[in-house]
Amino acid sequence: MSAAIVLGLLATTSSSQAAAPAVLARFADEPAVRELQRAAARLAEMHPERVQSWLRRIRASAVLPTVKVSVGRGLDELTRDSSGRPTFSNTDTWRFEVQASWALDRLVFDRNELRASREAQRVASRREELLVRVTQLYFERRRLQVDAALTPDAPNAIDRTIEIEELTAVLDGLTDGALTRGKPGR
């Protein structure tokens, strides 16, 4: 390769690298990708701490008894007389019964933990998919914005602008408007 071509390539590369911070600085007023990810997770109610709360409550519920209360008046009672024959008697008194029982085996393992675990896996998977999708859309939009800033008179400028607006709308839909709220003048 000739020295002129190599110097030309180096000059182009260094000038585009020098322009990169200036171009990216144009978007400093927009929210960072992490802010949009948090907004999307909050909107979709996909919080890992919620699953931990479910598991704590499942374990704590095993300590609480199951309580049954019965109240009755004038009930028929089945009794046996001295010869062993069943007889029914009608009482006119109030009867109260309270029964408490504990399932102490649930302190060791509760089958609801399996349900909570499966739900936790489902939530984590959906959360990961959502965060990846928001990240992909964010940086696809950013690449289009940088391209628009560097080559504003490109033949596809109108299509690029429409695509930027489309990605903005999708990101706003996923984040409850967090992207446009972060922009001045919107």
Image: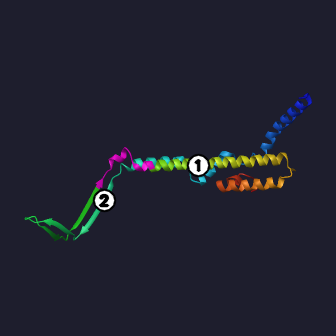
40 magenta-colored = no
**For the magenta stretch, what is the residue range?**
100-114
At horizontal 27% and vertical 65% (from top left) the residue drawn is: 71
Q: Are marks 2 and 1 in contact (CB under 8 Å)?
A: no
Task: Describe the element under mark 1 as helix, strand or loop.
Answer: helix
Residue type at mark 2 is: Lys
Left or right side of 179 for 124: left
Q: Residues within 10 Å of mark 1 (few under 14, many from 20)?
A: many
Give the tally of numbered discs: 2
What residue does disc 2 label?
68
Q: Residue at x 10, y 64 (%)?
A: 84
Circle number at residue 127: 1
Please provide percent x and percent y for residue 49. Answer: 52, 47
The residue located at (78%, 56%) in the rendering is 162
- 71 sits to left or right of 85: right
Q: Quadrant of the N terminus?
A: top right
Q: In the rendering, at what x and y percent does residue 186 appear?
A: 74, 57
In what element is the residue under mark 2? Answer: strand
Q: Is residue 111 magenta?
A: yes
Per the model, the C-alpha gap separating discs 2 and 1 is 41 Å
Task: Give the crowd class for mark 2: few <14, some 14-19, many >=20 residues within 10 Å.
Answer: few
**Which amino acid type is shown beneath numbered disc 1?**
Arg
Q: How far from the left and from the top, in percent, is residue 60?
A: 40, 48
x and y, in percent, of residue 86 in the image: 14, 67
